[in-house]
Image: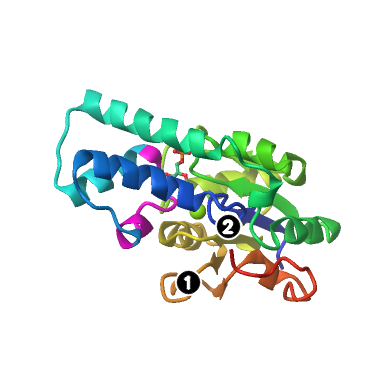
Amino acid sequence: WCKGAIFDLDGVIVDTARYHYLAWRRLAEELGFEFTPEHNERLKGVSRMRSLEILLEVGGISVSPEEKQQLAEKKNHWYVEYISALTPDALLPGAREFLTWLRERGVKIALGSASKNAPLILDRLGITGLFDAVVDGTMVEKAKPDPEVFLKGAGLMDVDPRECVVFEDAVAGIEAARRGGMKAVGVGDPEVLAEADWVVRSLAECLPTGGASEGSSEEK
Ligand code: G6P
Ligand code: MG
C-alpha cells in the first residue's frame, strides 16, 4: 500500500535540526533572552520567517519588517556557516540504508522540506540521486502544517497521497501529513510526536533488521 515515501530533511535524514537551534539560540541571546529546546520544538518544520516570528513572540519583542528581514538573514548566515562543513557523516542512522532499501523495492521517494537550503544539503551529503522528486522551501506558498509541501511531492512522484507515507520529526509536519491524507511516521520522541501513526527513534528502526546489524543505529 505504500507506493511513495516522502521525507522531511532536517532532523529526519540529517542532523541539521541542532544547527537550526544553535543559530536561533544565538540570535535570541543577541536579542537578550533565552531560547530553550522546548521553545525550539515549535520551530521545527516551520519556515524561516515564521520561525523568527515565533522566536520574537517568545522574547516579547516586536521589530519592523526591515529588521525582521535582517534578523532572518543573520540567522541564515550563521546556519549556513554551521552546515558548510557538512559531510555524509551527518546523515542520521539508517537514512541512506532505508532510502536505498525502499528504492530497491520500487517505492518512489520525495523530499518534502520547508528549507530553502535543502538542495545544498542533499548535495553535501551526496544523496541527491536517491530522490525521484525534491520539494524545498522555495517551491511552496504555505508552510507546514499546511499539506502543500507533501501534496506537491506526491504530485511530482505521480503517487496518490493516500498511498504515501511521510517521515517527519516535527509536530507541524505530522499534522501536515495527516491533513494531506497521508500516513505519518514520527522520527523522534513518542511523547512529542503522539499524533503520528507510528513513531521510531531513527530510520534505522524502519529497516527489517531494525538497524541492529547496520552498525549505525546508536543515537547520536
Ligand atoms: C526546516 C526546519 C526548520 C527551518 C525550515 C526553513 O523545516 O525544520 O527549522 O526553519 O526548514 O529552513 P531554511 O534553511 O530555509 O531557513
Ligand atoms: Mg524536520
Q: Nearer the viewer, residue 47 or 220?
A: 220
Kind of residue indicated by mark 1: Asp
Residue that extends furthest to the right in the rendered view of this protein:
104
The residue segment tinted magenta is 38-48
Q: Could you say which quadrant of the image residue 218 lies in?
A: bottom right
The quarter of the picture where the N terminus appears is: bottom right
Magenta-colored stretch includes residue 40:
yes
Vertical side of 181 occupied by 195: above or below = below
CB at disc 2 and ligand 2 closer than 8 Å: yes
Q: Could you say which quadrant of the image residue 171 lies in?
A: bottom left
Residue depicted at x 42% and y 53% = 44
Q: Is residue 107 visible?
A: no
Are the residues tagged 2 and 1 within 8 Å (C-beta)?
no
Residue depicted at x 30% and y 27% = 69
Residue 120 coordinates in the image, percent (x, y): 61, 34
Residue 132 coordinates in the image, percent (x, y): 73, 44
Residue depicted at x 78% and y 68% = 214
Kind of residue indicated by mark 2: Val
Instruction: From the image, tell me which residue sits under label 2.
Output: 12
Q: Residues within 10 Å of mark 2 (few under 14, many from 20)?
A: many
Magenta-colored stretch includes residue 85:
no
The disc at residue 189 is 1
Residue that extends furthest to the top in the rendered view of this protein:
66
